[in-house]
Image: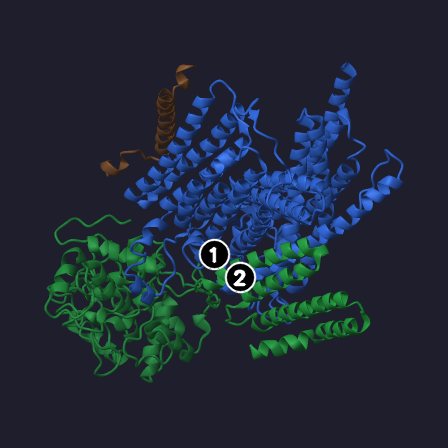
Chain colours: A green, B brown, C blue
Amino acid sequence: MGNLIVEALSMGWMALAILVGLLIYFQVSITDPTAKKRAVFKTFIGIVSTFLLFIAIANYKMNFYGESRLLPVSLAMITATTFIMALYFTNLSALLKIGGFMFFVAAFLSGYGNWLPQVEGGFPPKEEKLDFSSMTPQQLADEGEKIIFGGIGKNKEQGAIGKGQCPLCHAFHAGMLGERAPNLLGIVNRAKERIEDPKYSKGNPAKRDYVVKEAFPGAGTAENAQEYIAESHACPSCYVVEGYGVKGTNDRESPMPPIHKPPISLSLPELVAVDVWMYVREGVEPPSFEEMIKSYEKFIPEGERPQLQENKPKEGEASSLMADGSEPVDQIFAKAQCVACHTIPGIPGAVGTIGPKLEEGTTAAQRIKAPDYKGSAKSPAEYIMESIVDPSAYVVKPYPDNTMPKVFGQKLSAGALKKIVDYLSQVKAGAPPPKIS
Amino acid sequence: MSALNNPIIAVLVSLVIAVTYFTLIDHYLMEMQGLDFWYLFRQ
Amino acid sequence: MGVVTRKKLFSTVALCAIVVSLFLPIVMALPSPATGEEAPVAEGAPKEGEKVEKARDVYYKTEGIVVGAPAPKTTDSPTDYPRYNFESRVLIWFANQQHLYYGSFVLAVPIFCMIIEFMGVMTKDKALAKRYDQLAYDFIKISLTAYSLTAILGGILIFTFLTLYPTFFAYLSSIFRPVMHIYALMFVAESGTLYIYYYGWDKMKEGFLKWIHLSMSVILNVIGTLLMFLANSWIGFMMSPAGVDEQGRYLGNIWHVIHTALWNPLNLHRILGNMAFGGGVVAAYAAYKFLAAKTDEERAHYDWMGYIAMALGVAFLIPLPFAGYWLMREVYAYRQQMGITLMGGLLAWLFIIQATMIGILFLSTNYYLWQALGRMRGAERFQRYIKYLVFLMACGFMVFITPHTMVMTPAELKAMGGQQHPVLGNYGVMSAKNGGINVIIVTTVLSFVWYMRGNKVPTVSWARFGNIFMGVFFACAYINIIFLAIYGYYIPANVRVGLSVPQVASTLSCLFFMFALNSLMMKGAKQLGPIEWGKISARSQYALIMLATAFTWMMGLMGYIRSSVRLFWHVNEIMRDNSPWAYTHTVGFAANVISANVLFFWISILFVFWLGSLTAKKAPVEAKVGVPGAIPQPAGSH
């Protein structure tokens, strides 16, 4: 307030000085006592009004870009000013009153606007077309780290995860959790050993004892380490490391989804970037960009190669939401990549086995009643919401804790969450799946 | 016209007209959109 | 008789010729680029040996020959975004909004003039006819000063564009080059017609010439409307581009560029909006004159003027929500994402403000009508029922402003126990909202019916039945609307939308049938007393000012919403906004800027009114001095 008065005085001192001068002038020049009294009173009111006016203006000047929500108060003050003036300037009173009333209406409306919760639309995502082919290995490795962990230097953070979703299952450092998938430390060297494994049947895919024998008919097998890594991304079930197959298949099938296909859909250059990070972090010189791209082209037929996403911002994606709730529920499951880990009846492609099968219409109620349930949910819907937003509140046995990312509360809009909860609460064991709406 | 000046008859006649009119409006305009009064029960 | 008919025929033909010649440039301009073959010639023949490149229209999906350059990729630099020490976006916002306010006022007033002049010609009552005519003349006089201001503001707008967004403006004008000159020529035609219309008013006062004069107002409005359509095509293009390929290259079909997905809904919405806005401004002018009036005569005149302006404004306000509904539907059809950003995303709070304002507009209209009952003898019998109307409106209003879904943080979500409020959330669905607004409109219609009956008692033989029928019809309409609103809860969301159609039909039936029936019943009705113009309370005039201010504010708000839904695009999905102001402001900031715009407009237009009152004071003196029968000099219009 003090600042405001100082600012108002510094802006309006001239006008005020003139009015004070007038006050003195009237005091001196008018002899008739009643006329004098009136003139003096009018000028005094004028001074007060002018002062109010300048405070109002000062408020605008100082707080225009600020967080202050009190700007409309200025308008209300101007209203007061005009109404005071209208009392004394009867010639213009209609004009002043109307003007004052308009200020009042505007003050009310913008006050209303300022009273509402304030949402600011963030800046659009930077328009950068990443040109992976011209990057140095270090730059590529950085991009790779971003894809795997969501940011440069985040590889040692527990729970850090990028669009590649790799750390959901794989561990990347010695001693880190990874019972669903092999630890990838040293993979660039181990790859050479893997292709010599008799089970891998290098050069003779037909002899393989896996669900899928080749990435695509005629693709053949890997001839070198880089090709092995590429094949593992493109066709996880072409070779399964012992102990990491889908339970009950005797390691003939891998739980890992092909990474170039939806929902993860990494493009070839992105896959290369991921690989480069793995080479670079172990101090191994990676093959050239072109060679690595070729290794992927060997296992991914042309029609299946996803376009490099130019980070082309789609409408409304000013925020970093995975799904905003406008999509049908199956797309939300896909976008949030639930389908990679969970089996969800009725959702195409949701055959993941890393997390429990989601038949929450049946199971949610049982889980709340479970003796070891410590969460705060009272109803199945609340339980589902809690499981999404705070996965560690209750972990279904025998699945491990800390596998599911804890970011969905931020990454999904309220609408999307609601759709998920609605859908899941209708899925009942043994009943046909609900319709996708 | 004299019969219509009887309030009870007037109310009845008006009711018949108004209710028929709004029912028709609802019916046809809902039908245009593949809806009807019994949508709720059929689903 | 024969001579007169022939004369009439001749003038009609002449008028038609004027109209046709006005359309000529458009007709000439359209087909040649539309064929796509001559266009390159028009744009400067392609260099020899250069291959003709074809590309696909982003919206119409047609193939076309690439004619223009791709949309420039801007960077945050002084070449693309030169700036003063202020946010450029706010400056352009201000310039645009002021131009738009004056523009819509100037476009709306001639439409009023046309209607009022026509009413004057049609009225048999000579005194009333004269009053109507004088009123129309007064209207056009106000708009003339505003007209030159509009032109000045248009110039300022262009300069602001050129200095602050040169790259973007260059791109837009390259796209619209084929129609730019049509636009300019139409502007000249508009000015010319307006001046002839205004200065010829007294010369063309009598008989057949009056008809010519009246037809001229039609032409004036046709030109004005076309001007606005052309201006709309720019914003339509920015929101939902068409006629260009993915890189923003012009494909030679100017009609595609103009006729984008949102062009027609915008046109309709803007015409109606302009009319309601113009009505508001004129009503505010009348209110100002009323409050400043010294004599009863003046008060009576301006009371009447305010009433007419308000009635016309509200007549266009009532269909406005439906036009808005159409626009919204087209937005959803064009890009669902855009619709969601508007209604359920980033900009949703602004729609809450809008809903509040629609409520305020209807409430102040009703308040005015209730107050206006006070100037009629015999209207006292309605006073005690008004409280029920207030109750109905308040209920409708409450339901109407309740939001359904909002952007919420997970914490807020948890606190509320779901995405919707356990109780209130139920009222926020579209079904209930449609019910709410329709109840409000039907109530407004009811208020109007009462107002029209204020000092009259029907004498037709079926009066009793008529009264009962109207009562029953209104009751059934309310019941039907509310029934449909409730029924909507029980059927899935995607089909429930369809229920709004019978709801709207019920409202419109009330509007048309009840007005028609009422005027039939009021034929030869017994008057309980005259309408005592000027006896209305001063409060009612503040309702008019409220209406006008709120409408101006709402226009600013909707314009802001419409413009900011593009988020960080200059031209949606074609040209990115890479300036430092590509983000969306908070609701509060937007509200402050809108307030500033509204107040600037009103202060300036009050100043214009005040200027007008200066000359009006001079006029009687001149009249005394001047030769009787001389043409009154239009005062101080430019």
Residue C539, visible in the rendered structure: yes
On the image, the x and y values in percent for residue C237 come to: 56, 50
Residue at 73% of width from left, 29% of height from top?
A: C15
Q: Using the numbered discs, state the Cα–Cα distance from disc 2 to disc 1 in whole angstroms.
A: 9 Å
Q: Quadrant of residue C340?
A: bottom left
The front one of C240 and A279 is C240
Name the chain letter of the residue that bears numbered label 2: C
Tell me the element at label 1. Answer: helix
On the image, the x and y values in percent for residue C524 come to: 57, 22
In the rendered structure, the answer to whether residue A214 lies left or right of residue C187 reads left
| Residue beneath disc 2 | C590
Amino acid type, label 1: Leu
Against A130, residue C418 (above or below) is: above
Residue at 47% of width from left, 56% of height from top?
A: C350
In the rendered structure, the answer to whether residue C16 lies left or right of residue C229 reads right
Name the chain letter of the residue that bears numbered label 1: C
How packed mark 1 is, by other alpha carbons closer than 10 Å (few <14, some 14-19, many 20 or more), is many
Marks 2/1 in contact by CB < 8 Å: the verdict is yes
The front one of A379 and A129 is A379
On the image, the x and y values in percent for residue C113 come to: 68, 37
Q: Quadrant of residue A375?
A: bottom left
Q: Reading the chain from its start, which is encountered first: label 2 or label 1?
A: 1
Amino acid type, label 2: Ala
| Whether marks 2 and 1 lie on the same chain | yes
In the rendered structure, the answer to whether residue C436 lies left or right of residue A99 reads left
| Residue beneath disc 1 | C350
In the rendered structure, the answer to whether residue A252 lies left or right of residue C404 reads left
Q: How many marks?
A: 2
Residue C576, visible in the rendered structure: no
On the image, the x and y values in percent for residue A25 come to: 79, 73
